Image (cartoon, rainbow, N blue to C red):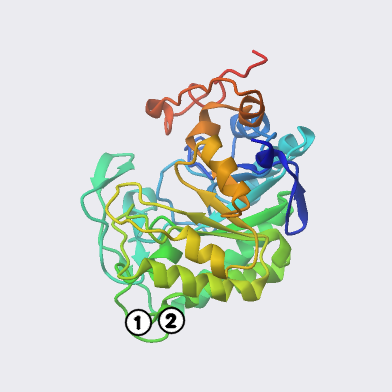
């Protein structure tokens, strides 16, 4: 396990270990999408992570996909997040904010009647979204016009500026899991023609434009990107996820980012393949793996130079002191899925530490 505790240079930051906390949507913000003191407690409890990657956060107003998720577009939200970053830094931690647009995963009942938007008029199938009126089927999104996309890019730039004002150490651009940037990226959701559809280069254009503008705000050494080329969550699929991964990894080399955060598999097991190996072969920066790693597998992957760090999700959710538990070989708390998205402290800030 020693490799998990070797320091790692990630852009401008030196991480004390390679046990990162993956972004985890927990729906503990208030009705105005303002981060709460409870969220500050939650993240500060987990400050021993090499890096905390905060949950998917609305870059711009009117794009809620989870009802009670946080935003970073208002003064109140910036102030709420400042309480979080202050708490994390006081506890000795480092924290990036994941900035995000929900795309077709949004719903009109969560956004004052506004129809969700996407690259094409294709709805998420065979799933439902939680709304104030109970679970509802996803809606058919309105296809964004090319001339609207600069406004999306500008929204991400403002979010990056607001994240800096809130005291974060950097930002992660959310290009994964079937949300807007990923919807453009993968050909199962993007059926458009023109400069943002068709070829991999065109489908990646919006993601790359967002990365470019966020780098202008932060500098490339404080910006990461998350992608999930195999994940079928939110009705996502791509005709050639390996080719997409290789093309994008090569292109991202131009930015000299803090890291590339790669989800290696599919939540539902509908798509399979190895994206980690070909990306490692061509990507020249820090590669973070995610999805289903045990501490033992993570350490072995680092030892074999397959990646540089691992972002743990559910295990960090249930174990605030995960690095200490891994170092000591201690048993891990089991997560309670029934409290993943419920309000309050239960299943959020009440998981026990080894210290009690």
Indicate left or right for 283 with 193 as reference. right
Q: Within 10 angstroms of label 1, few (less than 14), some, or many (20 or more) residues? A: some
Q: In the rendering, which numbered label is found on residue 241? A: none
Indicate left or right for 2 with 351 as reference. right
Name the residue that disc number 1 marks.
198
Q: Secondary structure at mark 1?
A: loop
Regarding residue 243, the answer to whether it shows in the image is yes
Residue name at image x 62 percent, y 25 percent? 325
Residue name at image x 41 percent, y 76 percent? 203
Indicate left or right for 89 with 138 as reference. right
Residue contact at pointers 1 and 2, CB within 8 angstroms: yes
Residue name at image x 38 percent, y 65 percent? 183
The percent coordinates of residue 315 (x first, y second) are 51, 32
The percent coordinates of residue 162 (x first, y second) are 67, 57
**Relative to residue 125, is residue 145 depicted above or below?**
below
Q: Residue furthest top?
A: 356
303, 257: nearer the viewer: 303
Indicate left or right for 307 with 68 as reference. right
Q: Residue furthest left?
A: 126
For marks 1 and 2, give the CA distance: 6 Å
The percent coordinates of residue 283 (x first, y second) are 58, 68
The percent coordinates of residue 165 (x first, y second) are 73, 54
**Relative to residue 233, is residue 181 depicted above or below?**
below
Q: Within 10 angstroms of label 2, few (less than 14), some, or many (20 or more) residues? A: some
Quadrant in which residue 305 is drawn: bottom right
Q: Secondary structure at mark 2?
A: helix
Regarding residue 21, the answer to whether it shows in the image is no
49, 340: nearer the viewer: 49
Q: Residue furthest front?
A: 304
Q: Quadrant of the C terminus?
A: top right
Q: Quadrant of the N terminus?
A: top right
Name the residue that disc number 2 marks.
202
């Amino acid at each position: 396990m020693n490799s998990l505790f070797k320091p790692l240079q990630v852009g401008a930051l030196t991480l004390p270990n390679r046990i990162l906390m993956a972004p985890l949507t927990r729906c503990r913000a208030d009705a105005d999408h303002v981060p709460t003191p409870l969220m500050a407690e939650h993240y500060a409890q987990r400050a021993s992570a090499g890096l905390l990657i905060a949950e998917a956060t609305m870059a711009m107003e009117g794009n809620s996909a989870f009802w009670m998720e946080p935003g970073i577009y208002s003064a109140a939200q910036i102030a709420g997040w400042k309480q979080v970053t202050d708490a994390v830094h006081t506890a000795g931690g480092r924290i990036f904010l994941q900035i995000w647009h929900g795309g077709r995963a949004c719903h009109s009942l969560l956004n004052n009647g506004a129809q969700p938007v996407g690259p094409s008029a294709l709805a998420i199938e065979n799933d439902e979204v939680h709304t104030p009126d109970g679970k509802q089927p996803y809606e058919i999104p309105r296809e964004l016009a090319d001339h609207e996309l600069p406004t999306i890019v500008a929204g991400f730039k403002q979010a990056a500026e607001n994240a800096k004002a809130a005291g974060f150490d950097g930002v992660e651009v959310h290009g994964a899991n079937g949300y807007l940037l990923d919807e453009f990226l993968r050909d199962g959701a993007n059926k458009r023609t023109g400069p943002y559809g068709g070829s991999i280069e065109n489908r990646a254009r919006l993601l790359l434009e967002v990365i470019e503008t966020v780098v202008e705000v932060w500098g490339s050494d404080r910006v990461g990107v998350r992608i999930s080329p195999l994940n079928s969550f939110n009705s996502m699929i791509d005709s050639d996820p390996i080719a997409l991964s290789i093309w994008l990894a090569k292109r991202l080399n131009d930015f000299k980012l803090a890291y590339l955060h790669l989800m290696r598999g599919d939540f539902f097991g509908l798509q399979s393949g190895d994206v980690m190996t070909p990306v490692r072969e061509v990507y020249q920066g820090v590669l973070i793996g995610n999805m289903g790693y045990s501490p033992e597998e993570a350490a072995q992957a680092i030892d074999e130079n397959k990646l540089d760090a691992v972002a743990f999700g559910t295990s960090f959710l249930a174990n605030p002191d995960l690095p200490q538990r891994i170092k000591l070989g201690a048993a891990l708390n089991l997560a309670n899925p029934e409290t993943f998205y419920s309000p309050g402290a239960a299943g959020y800030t009440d998981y026990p530490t080894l210290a009690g």
